[in-house]
Amino acid sequence: MQRREFLKMAGLGILAFPRLGKSADAGFQALEKSKPNIVFILADDIGYGDLSCYGAKRVQTPVLDRLAREGRRFTDAHSPASTCSPSRRALLTGAYSWRQQGGSAIMAGDAALSIKPGSVTLPAMLKQAGYTTGIVGKWHLGLGNESGPDWNDGIKPGPLEVGFDYAFFFPATGDRVPCVFIENHNVVGLDPNDPIAVSYAHKIGNEPTGKENPALLKLKHSHGHDNTIINGIGRIGWMSGGQSARWKDEDIADTFRQKACTFIEQNKDKPFFLYLATHNIHVPRAPNPRHHGQSQCGTRGDSIVELDVAVGEVLATLERLKLTDHTLVVFSSDNGGIMDDGYHDVSGSGYDDAVCFSHPCNGVLRGYKGSLWEGGHRVPLIARWPGHIPPGSECTELVTLLDMTASFAALTGQTLPRDAAPDSCNVLPALLGLPHDKPGRDTFIAHNGGTKGPMAIRQRNWKLIQAGGARPSYADANKTDHAKAAPPPPFLVNLADDLSETKNLADEYPDKVKELQALFERQRDAERSRP
């Protein structure tokens, strides 16, 4: 795309570029000469206070701290939802996941693919721009047609049908069956004489379960997670077969890291997009033994250390191949942090429970994963691109993972169709630290899961949690007042004055409540929020 065409499109709003400042020409000329590699690292359940560059004291993350020093740290970045599947779907599609049923909530491990094959997605858009695209890590967006995947034959549609050239992943989460890796369309290491069967409705096969055989567990569950035992750990769902293909939890981080580095190595001579979706630090937290005791806040903290080390290996691969200066690296998380999410894997042997649980995984923010409070969806975000992003800089603008599609489209000179990525805003100037007159995004709708709400609507510093949504949120996911307490009223807060959401201003500013509710309804009914 020529500079004149780019500026014309920006002026028409086709790229929805915020008005640039006086340094726009220099910034654009730098972009015009480069089609950078893009490595997007999405951690799992990392909270706003889990990294030392975001204030953590009992766990140190020197690699991610270095990434922040060499790049840009964001203080108002958000996952599209406070749970995993809807956040991941929104990242890849640029659409709020509450706009459609499939992928709007946490998905079972045998669910059908939630993204329509052939649709415009983040990887498909970058593939059109000439990138080789790959995913390594957690998928959790469903596989197969409406009846779900056939684990023993070609597993499709899947990542390759929605824009990825290469895929190495596990289907859902570490605590859900099937506990196997998939490469492109096939289970890795599967013996055809030992076919896989999976059920989320009832027990299948005769393998022991956590509920019936607790003595066989090497990691005890605190709630749920008591179905088929794999590698000494009870899971959600039942599985039989596939013995030769089953993973060992302690090796998952190393496996994903090795596959990510291999993808980079194999594509070093052409533009590539790598979506590295780590298992760390989702449950079950079973870091490799070499990381045990490396933090001051238990197994959960050791899992954060393992994540930091894995990111370091990816960055080292870029450096060894002399790709650092030609690669945009973005790190973030799929939702806020949680402490006890179903297993006794917060503290661990040799750690003091009280000390480990006192770690503020979401910093000063209220709430945890699965809530509409800031702790559920305000997440770390770090971006580095040497020579283009000012080192050691900080951005206070509102940005979301939804915005990666529109922003990377602008970066690579792509034009998004009108009906594609309907909620993705172009925040590229904020991402790169280019001067601009106004932010690329000033509204955001957060949700937990499902299509009906309640939800939270944000406009600049004002935030409204709809009636029923401002429920108590706990570090232990099993604690709940849902069955006992009446639905709470709307909760209004000005985050500029009250980031910890301590005081409800709804009675004091009833007109603001009505205004934000009307804004939500307009964006919902318009079926898009992108300019």
Image: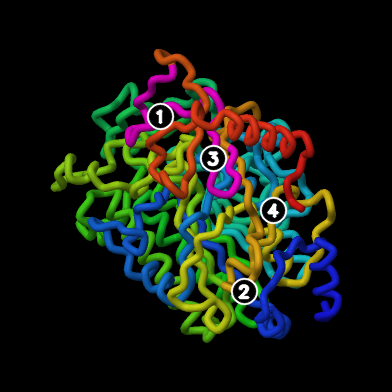
Secondary structure of the residue carrying numbered label 2: loop
* Amino acid, disc 2: Pro
The reply to whether residue 208 is visible in this rendering is: no
Q: Which residues are magenta?
A: 457-482
Front of the two marks 1 and 4: 4
Label 3 vs 2, first from the N-terminus: 2
* Amino acid, disc 3: Lys
Residue 2 horizontal side relative to residue 262, left or right: right
Secondary structure of the residue carrying numbered label 4: loop
Secondary structure of the residue carrying numbered label 3: strand
Q: Are marks 3 and 4 in contact (CB under 8 Å)?
A: no
Secondary structure of the residue carrying numbered label 1: loop
Q: Are marks 3 and 2 in contact (CB under 8 Å)?
A: no
Expressed as whole percent of the image width and height from the top left, the position of residue 26 reads 67, 85
Residue at image location 53% in from the left, 50% down from the top: 78
Q: What residue does disc 3 label? A: 463
* Residue 499 in the image: above or below residue 508: below
Residue at image location 51% in from the left, 73% down from the top: 384
- Magenta includes 461? yes
Q: What residue does disc 4 label? A: 424
* C-alpha distance separating marks 4 and 2: 20 Å
- Binning the other alpha carbons within 10 Å of mark 2 as few (below 14), some (14 to 19) or many (20 upward) gives some
Label 3 vs 4, first from the N-terminus: 4
